[in-house]
Amino acid sequence: AELCRKAAGLERGVIIETTNVEAAKAAVEAIKDVKPVLNGANKDNFEAMNAIAAAAGIVLGVQGASLEELHDTVEALEKAGNKNLVIDVTGADMKATFANAVQVRRAAIKDNDRTFGYPSIVNIAKLSKGDVHMATALASLFTLKYGSILVMPKMGYAEALPLMGLRQNV
């Protein structure tokens, strides 16, 4: 909760990434006024995470070990009445993440699957493993290929300017 208060003080968007329900509850309670994204709902904890997100009126991020699990969890959350969701397509590596992002968006558009019609979040900080050049390259890739929210390890002028130009030209 203390770390979340410190992050909220930076006046930037805050994403709370945890699958621990008690930690999520404490973190959301500490900074619910800044409307963070609570990313960590999965097949095991989605009911409790949904209750936390709904009570605070914030966006809930959904994760899954596979696309089928992700689909089933989003479907269950929709049945529970929550349509304020983002889908975390971050996989074990870059290849899996790219495949997830493309397959989720393709299912939403081509197959008209509304369950996968939510914005997607890609955690580039996890994928780049501290390499800022790789993070910028991945950010470019996911700006072009269906990454709605990109979690960067660092965002300075040198990283932001090419991404903004790229985004405007898409």
Image (tube, rainbow, N blue to C red):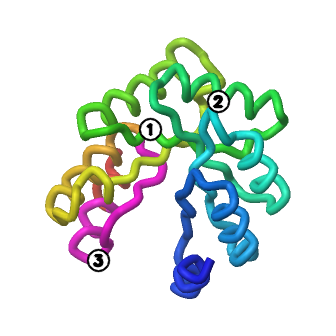
Mark 3: few, some, or many residues within 10 Å (few <14, many ≥20)? few
Whether 86 is drawn above or below 129: the answer is: above
SS at circle 1: loop
Provide the residue designation for mark 2.
73
Number of the front mark, 1 or 2:
2
SS at circle 2: helix
Instruction: Name the residue located 64 percent from the left edge and 66 percent from the top edge.
Output: 36
Q: Quadrant of the N terminus?
A: bottom right
Task: Decide if residue 60 is on the left or right side of residue 88.
Answer: right
Q: Residue 109's spot in the image, x, y percent?
A: 52, 21
Task: Decide if residue 117 is on the left or right side of residue 140.
Answer: right
Q: Residue 27's spot in the image, x, y percent?
A: 66, 70
Task: Decide if residue 81 is on the left or right side of residue 123.
Answer: right
- 116 part of magenta stretch: no
Q: Residue 151 is drawn in which quadrant? A: bottom left
Q: Residue 20 is drawn in which quadrant? A: bottom right
Question: Reading the chain from its start, which is encountered first: label 3 or label 2?
Answer: 2
Q: Residue 101's spot in the image, x, y percent?
A: 40, 33
**Number of numbered discs on residues:** 3
Question: Reading the chain from its start, which is encountered first: label 1 or label 3?
Answer: 1
Instruction: Name the residue located 25 percent from the left edge and 68 percent from the top edge.
Output: 159
Q: Residue 37's spot in the image, x, y percent?
A: 62, 59
Provide the residue designation for mark 1.
89
- Amino acid type, residue under disc 2 in the picture: Thr
- 150 part of magenta stretch: yes
Number of the front mark, 1 or 3:
1
> Marks 3 and 2: CB-CB under 8 Å?
no
- Amino acid type, residue under disc 1 in the picture: Val
- Whole-angstrom CA distance, mark 1 to mark 3, is 24 Å
- Whole-angstrom CA distance, mark 1 to mark 2, is 13 Å
SS at circle 3: loop
- Amino acid type, residue under disc 3 in the picture: Gly
